Image (spheres, helix red, strand yellow):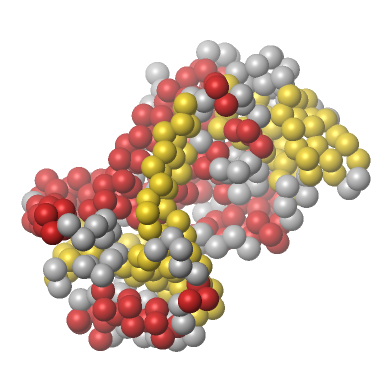
Amino acid sequence: MKTQVAIIGAGPSGLLLGQLLHLQGIDTVILEARSPDYVLGRIRAGVLEQGTADLLRAARAGEHMDRDGHVHEGISLSFGGTRKRIDLKQYSGGKSVVVYGQTEVTRDLMDARRRDGGLSIYEAADVQVHDYSSERPRVSYSHKGQRHELECEYIAGCDGFHGVSRKSVPAQAIKVYERVYPFGWMGVLSDTPPVDHELIYASHERGFALCSQRSLTRSRYYVQCGLDEKPAQWSDERFWNELKARLPEDVAARLVTGPSIEKSLAPLRSFVAEPMQFGRLFLVGDAAHIVPPTGAKGLNLAASDVQALYTLLTRRYKEGRLDLPDRYSEVCLRRVWKAERFSWWMTSVLHKLSDDPFSQRIQRAELDYYTGSEAGMRTIAENYVGLPFETVD
């Protein structure tokens, strides 16, 4: 079998890239190791930057998002018993974010690809990448007991941190930058109304907390905890009590609690692999970088990689610009590091890092400054809604 672009991974980034290229008449085949139901079972955050939402619309997969998603024009930062709202729309030049679950994003993209005739092969086992440094790369895989080979011109590795794409590159060819944080998030999903119509990020002497949501009837809450703690150690009662203790009194008073329908521990890490391109193999999304969830950048940063690769490949095929795909890593990394910086800053200023009083007062001063300064609120807002996509001349 032959195609122009082989895409490894049918998560949001692989599906989005495939759909955008398909609509431009560029032939793609998506290979996914898991079943569609397994892919849809991954529960992830769902705060979409305006640029990500616009890409979904361009992919003809934004109808349900526009109907069912919730536009948020602000977020709140809580510290010292007070709450300061950052008006995203006012301080970012009119932009906002959309709260819409990643599961729904994935389902919409699956449906769009099926509707428009794109080929996705699920349960493709033992995927291997070959000859990515040549002009004729290949991807081999097993499906329904038979071995297959997919000839292509480019390979997009959208298969995540543990996928085969980055592992196919010799370790000495990649420089890794990493920071592992000494804490995690204990998260609870519950069928309860959100405590607020916008997200609340709380910095407290007991640790960080986040009030998020999936819909008007389903909420997602997190509290900072040790990496050695297990979900089984956290009864619902313990979780709700700890969450209330970290929120301002007026917020805690109106928190609606209920049985958890999912409980999990999420470790936090910052990770970047450079470069993001090796010959005709491109690393996209989590295959190349991971951010702490504090800044809501994970899915959005993957989408910005997709936008860059989609733009470069479209111009390569439509304009004959054979040189442009070689600029992928350079273009992406400029935005990647800016998003890494913002996620690191949000993580560093909102979490309990130590018992050192000086460090705690510095954190408080940092929050006081940013929420009390127009320049500070503009900095938070423009980063939170998403910096502009990088342009390619």
Q: Residue at x 23, y 64 (%)?
A: 203
Q: Is residue 252 visible?
A: yes
Residue 122 coordinates in the image, percent (x, y): 76, 49
Q: Residue at image x 51%, y 36%?
A: 288
Q: Which corner quadrant holds the C terminus?
A: top left
Does residue 286 lie above or below 46 as drawn?
above
In the image, taking residue 201 as reference, residue 368 lies left or right, namely: left
In the figure, residue 173 lies in which quadrant?
top right
Q: Residue furthest right?
A: 146
Q: Position of residue 117 (x, y in %)?
A: 73, 45
Relative to 261, is 50 above or below? above
Q: How far from the left and from the top, in percent, is residue 235?
A: 46, 82
Nearer to me, 390 or 261: 261
Q: Is residue 141 above or below residue 181?
A: above
Q: Decide if residue 63 is in sight here.
A: no
- Which residue lies at the image location 66% right of the left edge and 37% below the top edge? 164
In the image: residue 312, left or right of residue 196? right
